[in-house]
Image: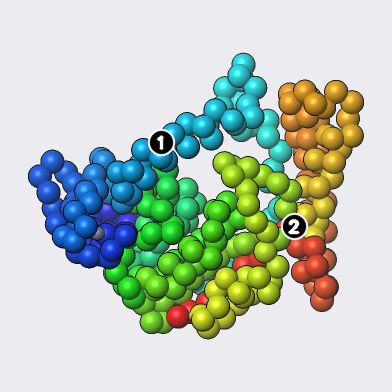
Amino acid sequence: MPEPGRIFKVLRCPYCHSKLIDSPGDSLSCTTCNEKYLIQEGVPLMLSSSKQVELKKKISEWHDSEVMPGFLSYDTIQRLKSPAPFKWFKRQRVLKKIYDEMSLEGIYIDVGGTGELDHPAIFCANLEYGPHTQLVCDGQFLPFEDGSVDGVFIMLVLEHVPDPFAITNEIKRVLKKGGFVVATVPFMQVLHENPKDYFRFTPDGIRRLFDGLDEKKLEIASGPTGSLIWILKEYGALLCPFSNNRLIYASVRELLGWILYPLILLDYYLLTKRRAEKMSSYFFYMGRK
Ligand SMILES: [Zn+2]
């Protein structure tokens, strides 16, 4: 985890990109539009006050709509859940290579992050305050000056935002010349609303999203068997009688998830195939400004 204070040096107003000044009572104020941003337990909340009100309402609606049997604790549910029906075999290797090139003095942002990227220079930014959040912001209004960020990670997030182009345009704006973006982007995945699910992306669609950057890599992260397992477990649950009951649906789905998961090893073989991208679960993209 990076030293939290470092982020304050580069923060700007997310809406007009002007400088911010410290105001008494732990907040930052924009020198141009007078918007005030609270700092909550050391975490800057870089959203306008109207956006915060709107978001609070939305987040409580999202949480209310979560499909969870009420009599089981959250931890029990997590233990019963089958593994995520996809696997990025090269994840560690790919990330290590990127981490090795990063400077500890640089500013790197994980947009929509939940603390999975563990590197001392990556700041975890999310729309919602969580245990790993170091910056609360909206990806469509990144609180940085043009050309001030060394790298941006956006991992399996773009399908969950209503306007992915608005976010990738913001990323391009804040990146320094030579700065990088690393993205994982889903293609063949079952609808997964956590909390909302809007889009899927083909390789050409991903290129369009990051148009203007120099493409360094665009490859399969998780292959066709990941897609198939996910489809089969949901399909099996749908076929099951009485699966309009959400507990029956979830139980059959998770049971099938456990049974089918070992098939994921087939992706080691399928990833050697030229046409594996036709039904891959998700892609990995890296580009430089
Ligand atoms: Zn402003």
Q: Residue furthest left?
A: 24
Asked if 8 appears above or below 214 in the picture, the reply is above
Q: Which of label 2 and label 1 is nearer to you?
A: 1
The N terminus, quarter of image: bottom left
Callout 1 secondary element: helix
Name the disc covering residue 188, or none. 2
Residue 186 in percent (x, y) is at 66, 59
Disc 1 crowd, CA 10 A, few/some/many (<14, 14-19, 20+): few
Q: Which residue occupies 37% across, 52% down?
A: 137
Name the disc covering residue 56, or none. 1
Q: Quadrant of residue 102?
A: bottom left
Quadrant for ligand 1 reads bottom left
Asked if 154 appears above or below 53 in the picture, the reply is below
Of the image marks 2 and 1, the number of the one nearer the N terminus: 1
Q: Residue type at mark 1?
A: Lys
Callout 2 secondary element: loop
Q: Residue type at mark 2?
A: Met
Task: Give the colour scheme of this rendering.
Answer: rainbow
Name the disc covering residue 200, or none. none
Disc 2 crowd, CA 10 A, few/some/many (<14, 14-19, 20+): many
Say which of 32 and 170 sits in front: 32
Residue behind label 2 places its C-beta within 8 angstroms of ligand 1 = no
Q: Is residue 99 something one can see in this rendering?
A: no
Number of numbered labels in the structure image: 2
Asked if 203 appears above or below 15 in the picture, the reply is below
Question: CA gap, disc 2 to disc 1?
Answer: 31 Å
Q: Residue furthest top?
A: 71
